[in-house]
Amino acid sequence: MPATPMADLPRDVDTVVIGAGPAGIAAASAAAAAGRDVWLIDEAARPGGQIWRHRDPSTLPRVARRWIDRLDRSGARFRGGTTAFDIEPAPGDGVRLGIDNAARDPARITARFVILATGARERLVPFPGWTLPGVIGIGGAQALLKAGARFEGQPVVIAGSGPLMLPVAASLAKAGARVQIVAEQAPAARVIAFGIRLWRAPARIADAMRYRAAFRRARWAWGTWVVRADGDEAIERATLTNGRRTWDVPCTLLCTGYGLVGATELARLAGCDVRSGRVVVDAMQRTSVPGVFCAGEPTGVAGYDVALIEGEVAGLASAGREEDAARLATKRARLARIVEHMDTAFRLRNELRGLAEPDTILCRCEDVPRSDLDAAWTPRQAKLYTRIGMGPCQGRVCGPALELLFGWESARVRAPVLPVSTRAL
């Protein structure tokens, strides 16, 4: 879909969808097909989000091509390379957004409706050596592959938690990497129980079997996690444990990550009710703020099929098609049980909270080691005393880790929620 110049983006619009992953694509398509004037904005150059990131549409799965084609035909207008960095109620009705684009002047626009489909990011758990070159997030490895990175012949260890490990292991194996082991921290009993509960979603079971077949030569170990990474200038080996024994696995790439956490910053800045890291929505995906809807991972990480339904519900509801949205919402309610089962199956074990040693860096932006922090502090004290969370990532990496280690919830959100040009400020 061709990008529309920023100059063509009017100052007053009907509907803005923020985030062009599955939820955003579905929301924009549904709202535009229902007659709304819809703008879909995303930081990436193409719609698809992290899961459907692509350079060539022919490389996408069939479901992705179908939805992107539907978006093209819907009449929604896509604006790539664009960041929404601020959100607030507009005088009267509507929502005011701060928009930045590197190629155009920043803008303040007012929308009657805003649909937040801001996706999720990985949860990284600090351990000794996690900042070594060659240690990357599991989702980061997937993004690098889609961007054209080459890993042929490299010995790879994948250690973390959650369903994302399977497709990434499969993709790396197909790309020629030598996957040594896939280590899931959750116990086998919980993962197997989760698999049994997926009988209502046979497509997911089929996907899992297909992914496993792609890296069948690698060991798949449950109840196993990484405790450290070692190497001189880059990673050379990862140390794993199952709680009974510890061993080293030589590797030049360690992919690690412990599930996903919803990107709720814009929702929180808007004043939406957020509980336990999830944006609270009703059956129509409405938030607690008038005119603001939310769909996809910010309301609970459940996979692209749930995100598509939520996005379509939000798009239809924002366009006044609540009867059509209600029929989809019923299907979404059934799939919501998967979220609960997934949370139980991949619940993080307590041992992960004790991996960081005193000199282990917790905040990579500001070089803050574990020894500089006191668990008795509040998050605000930690920021004032150490600057933790005040670097370029604004706590998006260390924030979820600090919540796991100390129980600190994310501090107050302020604009800009993402790095933007100085012109935008």
Image: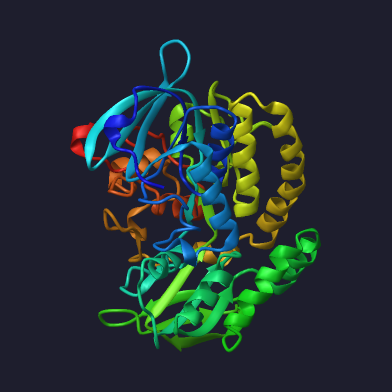
The C terminus sits in image quarter: top left
At x 45% / y 80%, what residue is drawn? 175
At x 28% / y 46%, what residue is drawn? 387
Residue 168: percent from left, percent from top: 51, 71
Colour scheme = rainbow
Asked if one can make out residue 199 in the rendered structure from this viewpoint, the answer is yes
At x 53% / y 75%, what residue is drawn? 169
Give above or below for 124 relative to 185.
above
Give above or below for 381 relative to 220.
above
Q: Nearer the viewer, residue 247 or 164?
A: 164
Residue 49: percent from left, percent from top: 46, 52
Residue 34: percent from left, percent from top: 60, 30
Residue 86: percent from left, percent from top: 36, 31
Give above or below for 383 relative to 317.
below
Which picture quadrant has residue 324? top right
Q: Nearer the viewer, residue 381 or 6?
A: 6
Q: Which residue is at the far front?
A: 73
Count the numbered circles shown: 0
In-image side of 288 versus 397 (left or right) = right
Asked if one can make out residue 355 in the rendered structure from this viewpoint, the answer is no
Which picture quadrant has residue 419? top left
At x 57% / y 82%, what residue is drawn? 215
Q: Nearer the viewer, residue 335 or 360?
A: 335
